[in-house]
Structure formats: structure tokens, C-alpha cells
Amino acid sequence: MQNRLRHSLLAWPEQEVSLKEGNFACYVRGNSKLLAELEPDQLNDREKTGIACDIIEALLHLQLSQQALPHFSLEHILINEQLQIQLLGQHASLHQDETQQKRNTCQTGQILHWLYSGQTAAGQPLQTLRPDLDTELAKACQVLLDEEQHNKDRVRSVLAQLQDWLLRQQHSSLNGGQQDNTLKQLLERMRHSRDFPALSQAISAINHIGNADRERLQVLADIILKDPSLTSKLLKVVNSANFNHFGGTVSTISRAIVILGFNTIRNLALTLLLFEHMNNHDHARDVYDITIKALFCGLLARQLAFHFGSRDAEEMLICGMFQQLGELLCAFYFHEEHLRIQQRCQQGGDPEQVAREILGTSRSTLAAETTRRWNFPEHFTQSLLPLPSGPVRQPHGSNERLRMFGNLANELTQALSGPDHALLGNVQGILIRYERALTCDFDILQSIISRTQHDFTDYLQSWKGEHASSKQTQTLRSISLTHRPHADPVETNTMPQHTLSTEVVDKLSNGIQDVTSALVGTQQLQDVLRMILEIMHDSVGFDHVMLCTRDPKQNIILGRFGIGDKINILIKHFRINPEQLDNTFSIALERNVDVFIDDAQAPAIANHIPRWYQQLNLAQTFIIFPLVLEKRKIGFLYGDKKQAHSLPLRPDELNLLKTLRNQALLAIRQKQS
């Protein structure tokens, strides 16, 4: 049998049997049925489009792995009662070529045609069969069916188009009819409270500062300085352990903005404005626990972003915090309704559904509409809406990634602050829900939670001058997933978790400070990049480190310079075509994700390692940090070790290595500006 792919959308044969007629693979059907047995007219177009997205995502996964299925049809797709699908046929998967890729793509279009119309594509056109079908859905189906339009990107673009359509439909359904009138009434009640207008004016003023504003640093400083309490709180947080990595005390807002950056101070100001406002009023005691939960959720979202390589960690922080905004607004401005919602939820009710019944709208919709009126960007307001139930799909672009991390942090925070007896079961359910989008297990998650708890304690001390003053605070500071349920081992390609090496962290931290000094000096770009490679090599103990960049004339990625024994041999052979997504290096660059290979000879990995790399036999463990600026694929930083499983990187060390990569990007940006 060929190498099987680990993916929740691809079914695994339970066993293989040989009969007189030939060899057969046996799949477990369980409570699922074949897609061909489904009655499409019993589903609405949103449900059909969700199924279509899953089918296309499975097809993309096969294509990126250079595999194809000989039969891509209704009879080779299982679907369960939750409308979750799995493809059959891994036992007979083929090596993908252009002809087979085109065939699978067209077969996918035929499946979509049947989903939306209930009839095969050989009959009448889809728009004739379904004149009421959204034109965008009909066009997406036609793109897959049209063999003349075949190109390698059309499947990906159709998936993005369908996902965008689903997102717009969800937003539309949340803001229609009677609910819209209810929202207007709620927002009007808030507007007439005694100081909500002042809060709104301050938040809106900060959000009005544009990126193109040449004086934006001074404008932000002026807005903050108008509020002495905000100024004092912000400087206290800036000088806390969470931010004070640069030495010395920051005594002015202007210096804080210069050192930490406009976006960091902007996000801190927005957060402090909101939460200090909430905690200094009549219902402060009732909203305190929500505020604490919001703080933890924001810090957790940021740590998730750090771990999984997102570049928008500070925006993730505020997105995570504002996940609790709806509950905060409800508790503060609609206190009686809030108490009724709490009572119903304690009896087992779903918070969003109960809120709709009592308020006339969900708390997440109230939060999104409030931030929209505060002039937050649209992608931010959308990130506050809950993801649809069921498995979470791979995010398409930074906006969807923001929403996914915010929702994940919120769901985990609710589980961590809930009853102890349900903790592990709830967390395991969350990990299963997000397994398509993220590779994560209990060990990785516990490490992320532990770092969040450390930040949480520091924040409470710097922000409120306290260690623990409520049961909620104590729970979130001490909760652990150490005693977890037994689970079958799952093959994952995750960063290894080993004992923390203080020496490595210290060396990396000192190196980052040296690079920071170099960036504000007069050093040449090549000197800064060499410095970064030396820090990687000396701190972590890589056998080889190397910078690889694109040659614009040949459109290939070449090894440029590096450190290590026989490095010249490695540099000479490093020639990666970024358009050929048949190897780990090209895939890392295409997806702009950091990749760690613990054993290049592992069966599930070896097919994705270029033959020339294997023949060199210089390293079995390596890591790739892509260098991508505004979607421009510049190259990557590379580090390796000779033996498999010999690179014990802790998350702390990994985050510092990512910081070095970001400094390399900053140096390149400065050179190009």
C-alpha cells in the first residue's frame, strides 16, 4: 500500500483482504453513509457549501502531497449525521500528474453540481436547474468543471471564494430583521448611559489614527495624555516584566511608543480604556471575573499565535481580550438581563442561544456591532463572531487566522474556567474540533497554558497590583492538564518538548539584543544576516545554519552563505524551485509556515524530502524559517543536526528563534526602503 496521509478528511482502510477477484480495502462505515445516499434537497445552501469546502480541502491536501484518487465521486465519500465527510480510496492512491490532477478537479466540480442541483453535470447547466442559486456558488462550480480553465491555483481560489461566501452568509444571518432592531435599541441604551459616549469617543479617536498619518505617534500620545489615569496605568504596564526587555525605566508615553511600537501601545491603550472603565463603576464586582477571564483569554491567544508562528501576536492579544466584550457589555449595561442569562446557563443553557432569547441578539453580535461603531477595522469585528459548529477548517489568510485563534483562545478559556470534572473532556473536544487547522496535543497545549499563566500573573501584578483576589483568578493561574485521559498515539510533526535550557535562552536573548543594536546602527544587511546565523549556530548548537534567498533571474531559491562543516557542499546543492510544491522547503515557503523535521527518514516524511538532500546525508533533523515580506517569497533561514531527534527545542527557544527571523525580515525591509 502506498504511503497514507494523516488527515481527518481522508478515511483509513481498516484492513486489506485478498479474494479471487483481487485485492480489496475495508473501511469502517459506522453511522456514516455514502454521499450518494444523501438527499441534497434536505439541506440548505450553507450546509451544502460547508460540505463542498471540506471536499475541496481534502482535494487540496492530496494535491499538495502529490497524490490523487482514481475515483473521486459520490460513491467514494462518507458523510455522517453532522455533515462531516471523509474520502475513501487511499489504498489505491496514485502519484499525481497534470492529467490526473485535472481529472480530480473536474470530478470535484461534478460533485458540487450534484450537491446544489441534485442532478449530474451531464444534464442541464446548474443555473438552469437552480435559478435561485447564488451566482457566486454557480460560478465556483463552473470553474471546477471547465477543463479549459485548468491551472494549479484554481482549486485554492475556489475554496477561498466558498469560504468567503459562508462568512458573509453567517454575518448576514446574525444581523438581519428583528435582531437588527434589537441591536439598535441596545446600542441606544448604551449611548445614553452617563459616560459611555466619552469611552466611545476615546476608543474611536485611537482607531481613527491611520497608518499613513505621518504624525500618528504624536497623535496617539496626545490622546493617551488627555487621560491621566490611563497614562499612569499604561506606563505601569509598559514597565512590567512583560514588556521591559530593553533595560531602564520608560517614563514618557512618547518613549514607550518609540520602543514598543505604535501597535503595541495602541492595543494596550484600547484594552486599558475599556477594562478600567468597566471596573470603576456600579457593577464592578460582577464584571471583575469577566475582566480577569478576558485578560487571560487575550494572553492565551497571543501565546497560541507565538507558538504557531503567526506574525500578528499583538493583534491576537486584543482580539482574545475582546472575545469577552459582549459578556462585559451585557453585565455592565444590561445587568438584570445578564443575571438571567447566567442563571439559565447554570442550568445547562447555551450562552449564545440564551442571550438571543433574553436580549434578542447574541453577545458576540453585540460585541461585533459595538466595535464596528468604535471604528475598529472590519476584519477585527468579524473575528469576534463565533466559528460555525463542527470541525474548523484551515484558515485562508490573516483575517481568518485572527478569528480562528481568537475563537480557540475563547473556547479554551471557557473550558479552563469551568467545572473541574468537565475540563479534560472539554479540552479534548476542542483539540479534535481544531485538529484540521492546527497540530496540537495535550503536552503542547499545557506548555502554552503554562506560559500564559506566567504572563497572567505578571500582568495582574503590574495592572492591578495584586496576585490573586478571586476564585476565578486562582483557578486560571493554577489550572493544569497534567492528569489527562488516555488517548491513542497520533503521529504529528510537532516541535519537541524537552527540558528547558537556561543557557540557550540566555544566549538567544543576548543575541537578539545585539541584533537590535545593529539594526539601529550602520551595519550592512549582509553583516546583520551573518550575525543572525552566528547566533543561531552558537546558541542552539546547529551543525549547519544557512541563509537561502531567491535568484530573480532563475526564479529559484539558492543557498547563499552559512556556517558549519562542509557548508559549501550544502550551499552548492541547495537549489529549490518554489513553484514545485513536491518538497518540504517549497511547501514551507508557499504556506509561509515554520517547519520542523525531527526525522527526515521517517516513512511519512521521506517522500517530501528532495532526493539530492537525502543523498548528501548531512542531516536528519532540520528546521526552516521562511522569509516572506508582504507575500513576496524572499527565502528562508535553515538550521540542522546530523542525527534524527537531536534538536531538543523548547517553545521558549523556538519563540526566540522566530524573533531572530523577524529581525532578519526587518533588516531586509530597512534595506529595501
Image (cartoon, rainbow, N blue to C red):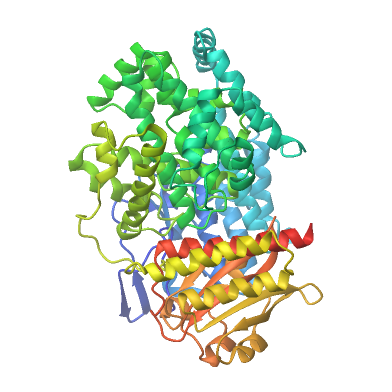
Residue 172 to residue 115: above or below: above
- Residue 133 pos. (x, y %): 62, 35
Q: Quadrant of residue 499?
A: bottom left
Q: Going 36% across and 28% down the picture, which residue do you hit? A: 290
Residue 517 to residue 461: above or below: below
User: Is residue 583 among the parts visible in the rendering?
Assistant: no
User: Is residue 653 among the parts visible in the rendering?
Assistant: yes
- Residue 525 pos. (x, y %): 72, 69
Quadrant of image for the N terminus: bottom left
Q: Going 47% across and 41% down the picture, which residue do you hit? A: 406
In this image, 127 relative to 239: left or right?
right
Q: Residue furthest right?
A: 553
Quadrant of image for the C terminus: bottom right
* Residue nearer the viewer, 640 or 59: 640
* Residue nearer the viewer, 464 or 141: 464
- Residue 4 pos. (x, y %): 42, 72
In this image, 315 relative to 36: left or right?
right
Residue 596 to residue 193: above or below: below
* Residue nearer the viewer, 470 or 570: 470
* Residue nearer the viewer, 650 or 96: 650
Residue 469 to residue 397: above or below: above
In this image, 130 relative to 500: left or right?
right
- Residue 632 pos. (x, y %): 71, 61
Q: Going 25% across and 52% down the picture, which residue do you hit? A: 481
